[in-house]
Amino acid sequence: MNKICLLALRRSYATTSTSTFRAADTIIKKTEHGNPKPDPNKLVFGANFSDHMLTIKHTNASGWEKPVIEPLKPFSIHPAAKVLHYAIEIFEGLKAYRGNDGKIRLFRPDLNMKRMLTSAERSVLPTFDGNELLECIKKLIQVDADWVPRSTSSTLYIRPTLIGTEPTLGVGASNESLLFVVTGPVGPYFPTGFKPVSLLADTFHCRAFPGGVGAYKAGSNYGPTIYVNQLAHSKGCQQVLWLYGNKQHITEVGTMNVFIYLKNKKGSNELVTPPLNGLILPGVTRQSILDLGRTWKELTVSEREITMDELLEAHRENRLLEMFGAGTACIVCPVERIIYEGKEYNLATMNKGAPLTIRFHDELVNIQFGRKPIYLFLQIFVVFCSQPKRVVDRMYISFDRARYCVRRLNGTHEIGCQSSIRGNSGRMYMIDNDQEFHIYLTDKKLIDSFNSFIIVLNVNLFNTYYIDYLMKHLDKKLNGLLLYLKSNLSRPLDFSHDDQCPNNRNSFYLNQTEKINWNSKGTSLFFRSFPFPIMLIDEEDDYKRLIEFYRQFNNSQSSPACGLELKSFQNAAHTTKTCMKRNDISHSLIDLQEIFCDPIGGLNIYSKLPQSIKIKPDQRSLKSVILILVTTDSFQMFLKPKGSTGGVQQPATALITFLTLAHLIGQEQDEFKKQNKEIIFVTLDGDALDYSASFKFMFDMINGYFPIGNKNEQPIKIEHIHSIIEFQSLSMTNELWLHTHPSSLINQTFIDILLRNNPMINLIRPNSPLPPASSQIFLRQTLSLSFPVYILSSTNQNQLLNHYYHSFFDDPSTLSINISTLEYNTTTEISLWIKRIVEPFAQTLIESLVGIKKNVIIKQEIINNLVYCILKNINCPLIHNVTNQSIGNTFKPFDQTSMPFSINTYPISTTPTFPFIKYVLGYFLRDRSYDIQNLTKISCKERAYNDSFCSYTFVDGYAPSIINEKSFSGYCVRSYLRFVQSISPAFIIENYDLSQTTYPAWTESRWTTISLRLFIIPTRTHEIVTLIIGILLTFISFCVLFFLRYYTKISLFQPSSS
Amino acid sequence: MVSLSKKSPEERLNICRKYYRAGFAFLPLLWLINAIWFYKQAFKVESYPQQAQIRTYVIRSAIGTLIWIIIIVAWNITFQLLRTKMGPLGDFLTFVYPRGYY
């Protein structure tokens, strides 16, 4: 038995067992209102708990589920659960310590994990990879990091527990189990210094026995000890000294391991602890004391059996030095008195203040809290004497979260902002409203007193009138602009920097005799080139910080003034032609090629039902392809690496509608098999700036590259296109408008069915001007001769209904979504609205293509999930459901980020948008006959290898709610998915002259540092005084040197004569 | 640099001639050095038989230097003024690009 037990302990804690959960899959549901933290000085052990807990369920049938971190709550558990009857329970106890450096540390958690696994095996509970649990625990602590006391003595106690929860009464292994971890802050075990304990050495009761479970941390070891502990209390002792066998072997103290420090008969000092013979719990503190003690020269450490007789003999001969217990809770606990067989023995432990016990305690605590006593003095010396902060850093106050404006270029122009390499600086002047604006401009004295100004302007005043006025009046003195948003409530009613007629520059609009100002509130400021940097502060506390400094230093002329420095230096200049040319030039091998700008564009992704693939020599019939279009990009003048990118009404709503429709088509695929039209879903990226993605798409189609990928697939040409349906600028309006073109080709029955199915839709008179939409290019490139387009939009005959078109204010709040309370399955107004649009639309498609009337219904849940994933957190359960989990969660870095809608420069910049759309679209349009085929991972791979037309993904996330299957071990998804880079053909055609306007040629400049800093400009008097003092000091030092040279004969430059 | 006065007149002439000839290999700095270094020998010291030849070399070196200076300055001005107008050629002739400017 001993041998088996030892063998079991030696194994690695990272089991190679195939079944484990993965920390990377952890789903985190944070609580909204945490509990108040208790006073760290009044903590009672085990009485306070942190806000969150970790739970992981296991069933023998489907293995471990994904770890979930959720707010602490009671379990609901079946009364017949085995744990409640047969104590199938094991646990661990460890602590997280917050060091003086603020870092949180765990103390040898690998040992706990190892022990937990051996305990689990002994209790026939499922095992797992200890590393993964440890990672999960780390995540839990990160979530509850505030609960780790900021104290040198209090810690966060961590209690991982594993219980058997199968609701059957038979005594047998549990089929279902639950692993959970709760944490809670605990105070020091001895708040007022060491307090030695008295022990009752009980000769009748025993804690563990050979072949028992004493070496495992099972709950069933602890319950029976309470009675004995009560006995000890009644005799005035705090703990029980557990003895075993006829020889009264000493085993443990209470719930701790025991250590006895004595002078042995040979005269040397020996630290004795019982060996791990099956009766002793392999404690982490025990192991650490052994490891630590072995490094000290003055004592020998031995793991050997020790009896009561030996202890008492040493006591009588005054050889007993100290005795203490060791455990996670107290670390060490000195013993001063033992009651044995009715007699009291006062031990020598505390005679000299238990120096060894204290030494162990201090050393372990220092390790646990990450203190290194040797370096402590040095550290203090370095920190306090050398002041490692540079003066430069102390001079400035940085605003890291400011939004900034960058430079973009096309074939003929540059737009955006530019600062000098070292940043533009000037005196800060704040203008909040129209009145202040005019006061400032008439204050000649102020304007003349400084050479350069950085104007801080309320974002409401950021329009052409004020900007032109400022630029004209201040001219060269205007060195930069900083805009501020006071709070979210004070956002302007309209804010759009796009043109009044978006994308009008190269006459992309069809049949438009008069110019329609679709975006009538547009300022066109995005398309202006500013010779100075512009930044924007949109965080409320940043604004408060700024105004605080401004008020403090802007009282009068005589006091120092606030200055601002804006740095956003852009590499590219002039035109796309110039910067692309410079990208290519490299003079030699040694000078590295420098990149100045990157072409704008992302990926055009397209997918359809896999059943409708046309492989050569199968002929494709004319007018058999319906394209459904949506865009995936947007732009805004002011960027921010983290934070809202806007783009909710344009294009997110349309994208969600599009994906929902894809799901419905996938759901009703059996109907669509009955007819011969292909429906291809296309997402375009790059259309926000002059429709480059649509140009690329048409370019591909005309040249026979559509669909890309397999050469044996029949290409789709213009003549194969039946019609184009596009979703554009959907804004949750009560009415929608259907724009159609050209009138000669439109299918009136389709329109009639659509209008009948969805009364919300109004038809715009055919041949009216089309609103800004990708279809413009599809029509333009085919001279409107080949196919009809249908654009479903919230844009009426002359007006976009989005007040924040192409700006970062176009966020979820405009759709009356409260983003902080939006959960994965919250039904919002917008998701109900989308359901009302998509269902009739899918019905219309079935009715007009297949010819039958069918009521189609989509689960509200699916739209809710899409809304949550796209608008709040792209690392959401939906994406886990549709991806292969064994390659890991690639969306982890984008946790809690909404889908970014901005200008992309793929593949230089990475965005989660494309993988998200690829996975979700492919999954929604999968071949559903594969769902029920129960293919294994290997056969799924084989199929992928043999079939070069479709893609196969083995999806092994947790069982999606979309398919109702109880036991779930993954399944194979067969889908059709293609994607192609969407940069404008201008960059693809060889020797294309980029200054031509045949194709758009937008590029985005590269930049390195963006910074916004505030500093204090001293007054003139202050500067003069400083200068005079400096001159005086130099003069004095010269005098002193001269004096010394005159009176001492030693010259530094010549060796002394001796 | 060795003092020329310590060298024999033949050696001086030899050095001066070598510098003068090497300058034709597009090395105007050699001519410049030649002109300055031998200026004293050519015009200031007491005359000696080789002085006439040294003087010719020095004068020719000086003229060469002047021509080079004119060429370089002219090119520099042209390039600075016309770089942006030269288009691709201008960019190709640029070694260190002015980042952020055309």
Image: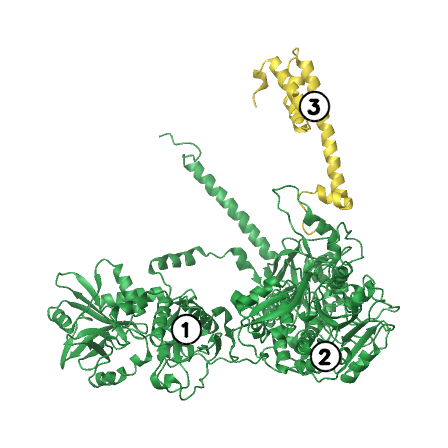
Disc 1 and disc 3: Cα gap in Å? 84 Å
The chain letter corresponding to green is A
State which quarter of the image contains the N terminus of chain A.
bottom left
The single residue placed furthest to the bottom in the displayed view is: A79
State which quarter of the image contains the C terminus of chain A.
top left
The single residue placed furthest to the top in the displayed view is: B49
Task: Give the quarter of the image for residue B94.
Answer: top right
Q: How many marks?
A: 3
Depth check, mark 3 against mark 2: the one in front is 2
Say yes or no: labels 2 and 1 on the same chain. Answer: yes
Q: Residue A331 at what x, y percent from top left?
A: 30, 71
Question: For the residue carrying disc 3, how many other residues have a C-alpha within 10 Å: few (<14), some (14-19), or many (20+)?
Answer: many
What colour is chain B?
yellow
Chain letter for mark 1: A
Q: Residue A160 at what x, y percent from top left?
A: 39, 75
Q: Nearer the viewer, residue A479 or A34?
A: A34
Q: Residue at x 28, y 65 (%)?
A: A289
Q: Which mark is residue A149?
A: 1
* Above or below A893: residue A409: above
User: Pointer 2: what residue?
Assistant: A842
Question: For the residue carrying disc 1, how many other residues have a C-alpha within 10 Å: few (<14), some (14-19), or many (20+)?
Answer: many
Q: Which mark is residue A738?
A: none
Q: Nearer the viewer, residue A288 or A963?
A: A963
Q: Residue at x 67, y 26 (%)?
A: B32
User: Pointer 3: what residue?
Assistant: B61
